[in-house]
Image (cartoon, grey):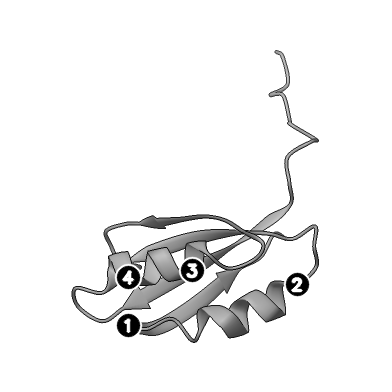
Amino acid sequence: MESPSVDLTRTPSAHLLLQTYPGRADEVASYVATLPSVLEATVTSGPYDVIARVDLSADDLGRVLVAARRAPGLSGVRVCRPA
């Protein structure tokens, strides 16, 4: 049996799971997408309205999190870091 391939060049990242007030997901995603080290921000469905991927190679997750909490329309945020 062959082992699954692993991409070792992939940028280490964390995910921000963002909850917004009703009707504000697009606004929050647009705001968060402009923050340094945010690789992408996507509007989703389910318990979280926006999921953002943050580049961890710059080692500034704390600054991104502080800035993300200032997003207009944000009601909550959770962070998923790699184990």
Q: Secondary structure at mark 3?
A: helix
Q: Please say if the residues under marks 4 and 1 sit with CB atoms less than 8 Å apart.
A: yes
Mark 1, residue position: 73
Mark 2, residue position: 60
Q: Residues within 10 Å of mark 2 (few under 14, many from 20)?
A: few
Q: Which tag, 1 or 2, sits closer to the chain's start?
A: 2
**Cα–Cα gap, marks 3 and 1:** 11 Å
Residue at 40%, 64% in the rendered image: 30
Tell me the amino acid under the disc marked 2: Asp
Of 72 and 4, which appears nearest the observer? Answer: 72
Tell me the amino acid under the disc marked 3: Val
Mark 3, residue position: 32
Mark 4, residue position: 27
Q: Which tag, 2 or 4, sits closer to the chain's start?
A: 4
**Cα–Cα gap, marks 2 and 4:** 23 Å
Q: At which x and y percent is residue 27? A: 32, 70
Q: Taking the image as drawn, is residue 37 in sight? A: yes
Which quadrant holds the N terminus?
A: top right
Q: Taking the image as drawn, is residue 47 in sight? A: no
Tell me the amino acid under the disc marked 4: Glu
**Cα–Cα gap, marks 3 and 4:** 9 Å
Of 57 and 8, which appears nearest the observer? Answer: 57
